Image (tube, grey):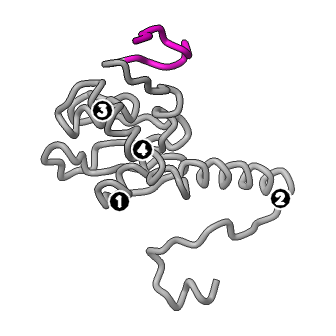
């Protein structure tokens, strides 16, 4: 059995190879929504605040940065990539977290809010340069009559 790593950008564990770059690119917001149905408590420009799903958190102190695709829990001081978040939520090793993400990657990445946020930011920059305004997206949280109006 050949145990040489065929791709230096991958990590080998138990003769299984995981592409860290692709796993870390899975949008944290999409993972939380798709895997657990978790939505942010508050949304801001480029990031959102969540109630930490792995502890009792009344203040929505877990920040998810859409641009960097990183999380930080202000209540515990912990943070990192999606792999670190899965380790914290599942109470598992890095290997188990990567295996978990690799199995869910196709279902999570489909319509990516991370890429949507990136696109929206790009359009906002264009609008500022042209000094024009356009509706880029309509929140599902708006009442249906306002969604139809817009």
Marks 4, 1: nearer the viewer: 4
Where disc 4 sits, the SS reads helix
Q: Which residue is mark 4?
A: 28
Marks 2, 4: nearer the viewer: 4
Q: Residues within 10 Å of mark 1 (few under 14, many from 20)?
A: some
Q: In the image, what residue occupies the spot 49% across and 26% down?
A: 19
Q: In the image, what residue occupies the spot 40% across and 12% down?
A: 1
Residue 77 falls in which quadrant of the image? top left
How far apart are the alpha carbons under marks 4 and 1?
11 Å
The residue lying toward the viewer, choosing from 99 and 1, is 1
Q: Earlier in the sequence, mark 3 or mark 2?
A: 3
Where disc 2 sits, the SS reads loop
Q: Which residue is mark 2?
A: 131
Q: Earlier in the sequence, mark 3 or mark 1?
A: 1
Q: Residues within 10 Å of mark 3 (few under 14, many from 20)?
A: many
Q: Which residue is mark 3?
A: 97
Looking at the image, the residue that sits furthest to the front is 1
Q: Which residues are magenta?
A: 1-12
Check the image and report above or below for 15 versus 114.
above
The residue lying toward the viewer, choosing from 49 and 7, is 7
Q: Are marks 4 and 1 in contact (CB under 8 Å)?
A: no
Check the image and report above or below for 53 versus 17.
below
Where disc 1 sits, the SS reads loop
Mainly helix, strand or loop, the magenta region? Answer: loop
Marks 4, 3: nearer the viewer: 3
Q: Which residue is mark 1?
A: 39
How far apart are the alpha carbons under marks 1 and 2?
32 Å
Residue 21 is situated, as x and y percent measured from the top left of the image, at: 52, 27
């Amino acid at each position: 059995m050949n145990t040489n790593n065929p791709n230096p950008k991958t990590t080998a564990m138990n003769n299984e190879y995981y592409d860290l770059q692709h796993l870390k690119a899975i949008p944290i917001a999409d993972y939380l929504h798709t895997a657990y149905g978790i939505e942010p408590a508050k949304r801001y420009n480029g990031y959102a605040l969540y109630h930490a799903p792995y502890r009792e958190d009344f203040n929505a102190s877990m920040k998810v940065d859409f641009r960097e695709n990183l999380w930080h829990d202000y209540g515990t001081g912990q943070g990192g990539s999606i792999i670190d978040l899965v380790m914290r939520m599942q109470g598992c090793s890095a290997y188990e977290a990567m295996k978990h993400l690799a199995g869910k990657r196709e279902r999570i990445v489909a319509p990516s809010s991370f890429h949507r946020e990136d696109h929206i930011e790009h359009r906002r920059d264009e609008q500022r340069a042209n000094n024009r305004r356009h509706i880029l997206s309509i929140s599902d949280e708006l009442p249906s009559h306002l969604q139809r109006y817009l």
